[in-house]
Image: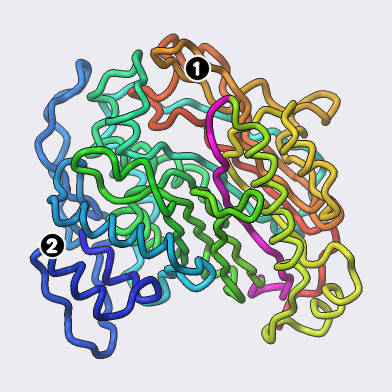
Amino acid sequence: MYPARRCSSLLHRELAAVCLSLLGTHPKKSGPLKKSSLPSSRLFHTSVVHPPPTRSNSSPALLGSLQVCQMGSSSSGSSRLFNTLAQTLSSAALADSHVDSDDYEYEQADPDALLRECEEVLKNRPPRMHRDFVMTRACSLQNTPIRIMQWNILAQALGEGKDGFVRCPIEALNWSERKYLILEEILTYRPDVLCLQEVDHYFDTFQPVLASLGYQSSFCPKPCSPCLDVHNNNGPDGCALFFNRRRFQLLHTAHLRLSVMMLKTNQVAVVATLRCRLTGQVFCVAVTHLKARSGWEAFRSAQGAHLLQQLCDLTTQSHPEMDDENRTRVGESEEGIPLVVCGDFNAEPSEEVYRCFMTSPLGLDSAYKCLSENRNTEPPYTSWKIRPSGESRSTLDYIWYSERAFQVDTVLRIPNEEQIGPDRLPSYHYPSDHLSLVCDLSFSQQPHRLM
């Protein structure tokens, strides 16, 4: 695991060299970037692990040029490296510290083959929960919706070391198989835009694997990630945003460190301005993860207010790559560029931060309200877990969208209690304590396609 080689925008070259030396690795000489070769399917390397009760040892050993690190494999040097990175982020402007996957090119993988590989590795685990899409309106055949996926995937260090899921066997959280469960979920729904929280295996797993599937990405770690307190951690967790680079062109990326009363907090956001290569339409996507725990409601509200203000500023900026129609829309509209905001808000709909987003001048609405009969009620839960303090069933995750600009075509149904199971989440058949949210959005006005 050598994340510093992809963090040139985070650190000066001298600091990168020092950090790499802690790992016993010498930085490569500067020169043209080389193409990284990934096999079409064999993207993971696994080691022998203790099998869960229903698992046999017949899973294939998956080999490839990409070595995916597992929990417990990092040295004390790597922990020092990530602490250095975290300290650097704490003292630097996050707007200039994003990491994009444009720096490396990867041989493209076959998503169907990779999904079959996931299913083969996981064949002795309980089957994945089946979830149907609910159509929320009649869609035109000429419409090409944008599939958005929001998911707190559960940081590996927190799942194994801090969160205390008392009904989840530790073997179910083993990274050598849990990574396949996460990737299987993503490959099943094939989002155009993927927003993830609690990502602590970005550099060694999600960025290279998803890059080989055609995604461009950006990652912003928490300045003081709790993952760093866990022995043999894999680095800080943070927010990651992925998008289909064949469909969208990146116009601008911003990394935000959320503030409360002018003081910077440990929560971050990634905001990307994208342009559809086919139609020329421009929109912004943001991913965030607000402060957790009961008693911090006012804190979350202040973080949300700061995020909304930052989004107001970012969505009223024009970019050279915009066509005249999009520049005019930005200049004349009070609401600016259409916006999608995904995140684990750690807040029920009764909280003030939820009301802030509902009443924002950005004109946002929540996609998952479309599942209710009155189209005005959130799902009963997006997270269901059992900790030493007791059982918790909460609605914490949301996909917000510009109501004036987008229409919700379909929404992925929330699994019922029987599907989730008596031990709740995470489990052998689901890798996180949060459910993924997936919806298809279409622009309300369809422009002429570009030639």
Model colouring: rainbow
- Where is mark 2, residue-wise? 23
Residue 194 appears in the picture as rendered: no
Sequence-first tag of 1 and 2: 2
Q: Give the range drawn in magenta.
A: 276-294
Mark 2 burial class by Cα count in 10 Å: few <14, some 14-19, many 20+: some
408 or 255: which is nearer to us? 255
Residue at screen point 17% across, 77% down: 27
Q: Quadrant of the N terminus?
A: bottom left
Residue 28 spot, x, y in % from top left: 17, 80
Looking at the rendered structure, the secondary structure element under dot 2 is: loop
Question: Is 291 included in the stretch rendered in magenta?
Answer: yes
Q: Which amino acid does label 1 sit on?
A: Gln
Looking at the rendered structure, the secondary structure element under dot 1 is: helix
Residue at screen point 43% across, 43% down: 198
Q: Quadrant of the C terminus?
A: bottom right
Residue 273, above or below 450: above
Number of the front mark, 1 or 2: 2
Residue 124 spot, x, y in % from top left: 25, 25
- Residue 419 is marked as 1
436 or 202: which is nearer to us? 202
Question: Is 293 included in the stretch rendered in magenta?
Answer: yes
Residue 248, above or below 147: below
Residue at screen point 57% across, 39% down: 344
Judged left or right of residue 144, residue 51 is: left
Distance from the alpha carbon under mark 1 to that under mark 2: 44 Å
Q: What residue type is labelled 2?
A: Leu
Residue 416 spot, x, y in % from top left: 57, 17
